[in-house]
Image (tube, grey):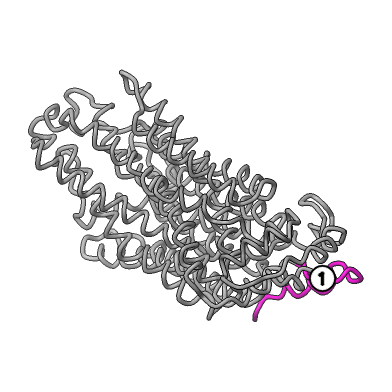
Amino acid sequence: MAKDLQVLNALDVAKTQWYHFTAIIIAGMGFFTDAYDLFCISLVTKLLGRIYYHVDGAAKPGTLPPNVSAAVNGVAFCGTLAGQLFFGWLGDKMGRKRVYGMTLMLMVICSVASGLSFGHNAKAVMSTLCFFRFWLGFGIGGDYPLSATIMSEYANKKTRGAFIAAVFAMQGFGILAGGIFAIILSSAFRARFDAPAYEVDAVASTVPQADYVWRIILMVGALPAALTYYWRMKMPETARYTALVAKNAKQAASDMSKVLQVDLEAEEQKVQQLAQDQSNSFGLFSKEFLRRHGIHLLGTTTTWFLLDIAFYSQNLFQKDIFSAIGWIPSAKTMNAIEEVYRIARAQTLIALCSTVPGYWFTVAFIDKMGRFAIQLMGFFFMTVFMFALAIPYNHWTHKDNRIGFVVMYSLTFFFANFGPNATTFVVPAEIFPARLRSTCHGISAASGKLGAIVGAFGFLYLAQNKDKAKADAGYPAGIGVRNSLIVLGVINFLGMVFTFLVPESKGKSLEDLSGENEDDNQPGEQGSHDSRTVPV
């Protein structure tokens, strides 16, 4: 059985050492790049509107039409969803390491290409930008299942949760880096190319050089990915893939001997026995998988889907909040580059205050409190704060109460990150068999991205004013912000309910969790029962 393999036991009980931290940095830099690339577009959409959709004589600067805005912001999500499914499946077929390099190269090429979007008119530039953003998203999608799987298969069982959460937490630094770089770049351009506000001189407020600003911001996303490519290629394949999926005991022992700096014997006979054991050879679409892991997969997909609806709907309120507390003045009072600076500054402050701390709270407590408790607590507080914003919504709209609204809003996202946003990433990398681990993580993550698309775009239309005349230009009437917040509160509550389908994986070996340690004479009885227990 898998538990008898010395190489896997050595990984499970290994003390935290240098190779763990290099694995976190190598896998984490992929996530850092993902976050930078996905979130940096929101820094430049207003600038794209001013450059390519300027209307002579208009009272306000040009903005992207709703359909173009949805395409530019959403096409990367669609690519990510497809990439998660495809590369998740490929990671189980070809090995984590080989596929990891492919996703990274795709991200580097498409980051640069999206900054080089070409054409003489708005339609051509937006079309090429959307094309390259889709394939950038496709590469980013592959990073989700592969980063999580590689980290979980390298980690020891005592601190595995913290290590996978630390990889995910690099996302916070990616968002932060995007904001800081945009602040530096826009400050430099603002100092060099001074321009009047839009209301003073509409045409002169957008200097020709502003076209370089958004291109440079998008292209810099290629740097961190390119820098880690060499280290990714030097990293050996995970022992669990080599031994349990590729059935190469000699290679697994040799790779891990170097990594752990201990002598491990190649237990080829045991691996041969594993290869002949039919109890653990069922496929994804088999009855046996449904019996053992069907509930688990339902739990990981639904919780991630529901979380991302709430998490990505935050874009709705961000612009209102920033304007309300005076971080971003009215667009017509600024020039184009000034506006990029103000938006970047506001996003950086939000990331610094609520996003980044939440991730690291999870890293600190996940192996003490457990995944289940953190996820349940996160969904509970998100539900409470959403209802606290929604029910007395009119109270929050008064100028005196705006700061209270921002504090409540920040707490919602603090508990998303110190809660289900991190745990939904960690758990699918732990509870499925090695030969299906990357695929199942990819399916769970793709379900999350589907939720992100619903959250970012469904609610963009849903939250519009009930009165068509007061809705944003080009949008139909919706149900209003207050009702949208109530819907989001209900979604978070459902997330809390579905959390009960997800098993606790704290402190157990991957093979115990996935049922790969079960005996032949009890196919599935003991292990599947154990792994389904939920702490009370």
Q: Is residue 442 left or right of residue 201?
A: right
Residue 117's image quarter?
top left
Residue sitting nearer the eye, 532 or 66:
532
Residue 500, x across and y down, in percent: 65, 70
Tell me if mark 1 has few (under 14), some (14-19) or many (20+) residues whose alpha carbon lies within 10 angstroms of its own.
many
Q: Which residue is mark 1?
A: 518
Residue 441, x across and y down, in percent: 62, 55
Residue type, label 1:
Glu
- The answer to whether residue 522 is magenta is yes
Residue 155, x across and y down, in percent: 57, 69
Q: Is residue 303 left or right of residue 461?
A: right
The correct choice, above or below, for 110 with respect to 509 in the image is above
Question: How many marks on residues?
Answer: 1
The overriding secondary structure of the stretch rendered in magenta is loop
- Give the residue displayed 53% in from the left and 56% down from the top: 235
- The segment highlighted magenta reads 515-536
Residue 271, x across and y down, in percent: 79, 62
- The answer to whether residue 477 is magenta is no
- Give the residue displayed 44% in from the left and 68% down from the top: 415
Residue sitting nearer the eye, 528 or 463:
528
**What SS does tag 1 mark?**
loop
The correct choice, above or below, for 247 with respect to 387 in the image is above
Q: Could one spot residue 483 in this view of the protein?
A: no
- Give the residue displayed 50% in from the left and 73% down from the top: 17
